[in-house]
Amino acid sequence: MTTPHMTSRRRLLAHAAGLAGLAAVAQVPGGWTDSSPALPGTPFTLGVASGDPRPDGVVLWTRLAPQPLADDGLGGMPRTPVPVRWEVAEDDGMRKVVRRGVATARPELTHAVHVEVHGLRPGRAYWFRFTAGADDSPVGRTKTAPDPRTSVPVSFAFASCQAWDVGFYTAYRDLAAQDLDLVGHLGDYIYENGIGATGGKRGTQLSPAHGALVQTLSQYRLRHSLVGTDPDLQAARAAAPWFFTLDDHDVEDNWGADRSPTGATPENFLRRRAAAFRAFYENNPMRPSALPVGPDMAMHHRIDYGRLASFFVLDARQFRSPIDIGARLDPSRTMLGEQQERWLLKGLADSSSTWNLLANQVMMFQLDRLTDPGLQQLNPDTWDGYAAARDRLWAGIGERRVSNPVVLTGDAHVNCAAELKADYADPGSPSVGVEFVGTSITSGGDGSDNTPGGQEWLAANPHLKFFNNQRGYVRCRAAADTLTTDYVVVDKVTTAGGTASVRRSFVVESGRPALQDM
Amino acid sequence: MRRTFHAAAAVAICWGLFTMPAAGSVVPDPPAAGSVAPGLSAAGSASRRLPVTPAGQILVVQANLQDSVRQADARDTRDLDNFARLLAEKAPAAPDALLLTEILGPGARHLANALSRATGQRYRAEVAGERSAFLPDGAVRENAIILNTGTMTVAAPGGFERVQDEDQAYVVAARRDGTLRVPLVAAHPGGDPAPAASQLADWLADRFAREGGVTVLGGDFRAGRCAVPAVDQTIGCAPQAFWADLTGPRAYTDAYFERGDAQARPHSGYVFARGDVLKAAIDTDMPDVSDCKAAFDAGRSRTADRDCRAAYYADEPFGWALLGAARDEQQSVVPAKLALDHCELAVRTADVMARVVNNTGAPLSRPVRVSVSEPLAATPAEATLDVPAGQAKNVVVNITAPRDTAPGEHRVTVTIGSEKREIPVTVTEDCVEPKVYATSFHSGFGPELAVDEDIATYWHSEYQPPHPLPQSITLNLGETKQISALDYQPRFDGNLNGTILDYRVYLSTDGQTFTEVAGGSWAADARLKTASFEAADARYVRLEGSRASGGSYLSAAEVTVR
């Protein structure tokens, strides 16, 4: 813990550095007085993060939680508002502060702060930190999106499915060391299962409060706090701005719209969904406009990176029709909901970006799990279960002559790379896009490079070019002519200290939706 | 004058409802006519006046109105108007208190007015929420309490107690005639009902220890009585933890279970009372309204068909309970009559529960004897209920008869202490037997999904908490047939979890003795698997899995024999 003496000295330095342009840099100028209540420990146990980068700013996040695993999910904070000072600097030593302000950490939001910073320069890295009472947070790095008129290559990574008790976040430790412009999380940030007294593979003592099925707001808050204490995850969140969408386990396995697969009434499920969404918002650097209203959260959004890349972050959970594999060809069914589907197609039509990246939860390409002729085994939960909606989406993409549509996917706990086909029944039909399915951070355990099931997938689906069953994340670089993708895998997650390596790399040439080896 | 006469006449007509003697209960005296009509009536209302409850009793209504989480739904009040009208038609008297869940502040006030008009009484929303169920701090407030201000008064101010991030409504009410006090809670757990019920009961005991009277905990507890959710809720099922806790050591009585003839119905609404339940019912003749809900939820009830517009209030039935002060010892036998029309593995089976509530300050012990005559059998035939002070205990007795028992009338004699009760038993012509059994299943993934000829649905054995293997699924073929193969279709949804890898097949003709006929290993894929064996007679076929893909659980999309 920082001593008061050191802190006050550091604050003095920060003041001094900022003095020259104080009026210019302060979004909430003046009136900074330290009225923080005494806290039972350092409040920055959950680290810092940033999100949703734009050319002129980002969202900065932290949450005050001196006792992050307090059973009530409130982080050991008193139920009073606490002023939290924030600073953005051009250097990692926090000497050249360019923006600063004071945000209020409110008990209603478990003392999370979501600061929308404006007035930054496009396409450059910044460093930021928070101060509450006598404590400084760790310094985080973030980066603004480039100027919309420029064609600057974009380096990004995406991850998903990080069951905390199943293993260690070794993949995040590797991700944190990359020089990234953006990190996307595609869902299953938390899992709703009860975690035993020794924390599964983590071997950490946990209170009985972690052992129950996660259903209430306090429980979702506690689970996010538990996941948020992980140092590797904190390092990754502090290394680059993130974007988020959520998937089923962030609420309940296989939910869709207002439906729970385990028999809860729609009303009870919507209250559960409201609690899950709220805890998700509180614990991630999302725009304040994403704060859920009751059981609803505006999750789909767009992030533009200069002239090269646009990310369309999708919500394939909240508006979907009921699961019914028998009705997969029914055009009245929807995966995204009418409004989001219209928004997506309009956004794709308007986009002048070279690469249009659809970040979504569930597999887009048709995956028949069996080689048997005349027998298809498809997953009702993925786009295969909503094949008519998929056909409609890709017909719309084709009509709008969208430049280089690329799908980024989580959920499946395996790495897959596939070419998206105009007609999966006809192997000779043209490819219309490509899809990169990224494996899980931990879910599924150590895994193996291949499996008999994976071999069969490859044999049964000629458009599937790569399968791997290890844990890790996916790293991409979108440049003017190419999109390169590295599948980073770790050799083990069930014990700490695994090693990361690139298992396979692909390159996609602009204008040619095909997966080519590097 | 005319109005008073009308009300008194209505009481006389309805009084029959109150005088049906519930086993062990004291038959109440009719009220004096003068106490019936406090002279309150909704302005301009020409509706009939419902009678009011007699001194020493209160009529509590419980309803989950599903009118809070969607704003458009909450604004559309046709369902509340329907509820008020149907309640006035179906309740045996003017309700004294309503314990409501899933209703907002404006809805509760609207309902109080509608109920005033429908009953000729005057109702007020004593405790009710805001315009949204979701509070700024993320908690939920959608419980409410409405009182009949003609019969009830607020004895101690109400409010909300937060449990599982949900604000539970409470108030201490009392009859205006001073004959009964009732601490009331409208409860709706936000998560697992067991800790919620325990927390609420602790809080009630602590906060209202000196209030006396009948504490009433009513609301929607999210779950049926039985721990394993099934359409058929047997008396002897392992109960949900919250139910066992409230009706055991905490000495509450589940009104619908004991007096509402609702034992076998799956429902999640309850009135738990620490007092005497004189009579109770849930709205069993609710029309089939499954097609109404979508329009009402969307706030477009005007687009629903005529029947929906006339009758829909929610897809959960409301219920009511007539309650009186606790007696020192409350004995009950549930149900009041039995039908041996249900078979399990070739045996007719039904349960009887004998229960003693000890409201005294000293422990008491009551022997329970259950006698039946052949071919019926009772297990156990004898038991002792040792009931600590201020608690309740029960014993479940299983009544069985062979499946081929001749139809006819029998009786079970249940003696608790010195009190003897006769329970009529009917052996029916037919005996309904499940098509399939499983050693366990996860909620929403019952064994019937493995015999529904739909490859997209599947049985999944319980994994929360983990259940050790082996687990099994047993088909009931309905008659003895010669078979020589079992086909197992693993789940076909792209996930192999639970796909059986090491299996055994057993056959039985009588449901009691099972003989192993096949065993082996299957590949971890979703292809159809077959176990072949020498042709043999079987009425029951069991597929047991001792190793499966993914972990300690089994799944099956379809299991068939040939």
Image (cartoon, rainbow, N blue to C red):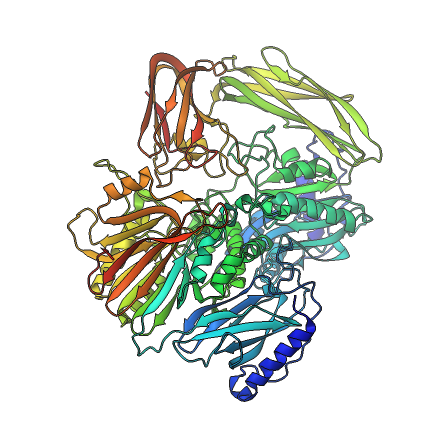
Residue in front for this viewpoint, A155 or B255: A155
Residue most toward the left? A428
Q: Closer to the camera, A25 or B210?
A: A25
Q: Is residue A471 above or below residue A232?
A: above
Residue in the foreground of this view, choosing between A257 and B357: A257
Left or right of B382, for residue B503: left
* Side (left or right) of A223 relative to A175: right
Screen quadrant of the C terminus of chain A: bottom left
Counting from the top left corner in percent of width and height, residue A253 is at 46, 47
The residue closer to the viewer here, B290 or A275, is A275
Q: Residue at x 71, y 37 (%)?
A: B278
Q: Residue furthest right?
A: B362
When asked about the image quadrant of residue B525, the answer is: top left
Whether B562 is drawn above or below B42: the answer is: above
Residue shown at 41%/37% (left/top)? B497
Look at the picture and state if B446 lies above or below A169.
above
Picture coordinates of residue B460, whole percent (x, y): 45, 35
- The percent position of residue A316, horizontal first and vertical second, equals 38, 56
- Residue B373 found in image quarter: top right
Looking at the image, which residue is at 48% across and 53% down? A169
The number of discs equals 0
Q: Position of residue B546 (x, y in %)?
A: 45, 26
Let me know if residue B77 appears in the view: no
Quadrant of the drawing holding the N terminus of chain A: bottom right
Res A113 seen here: yes
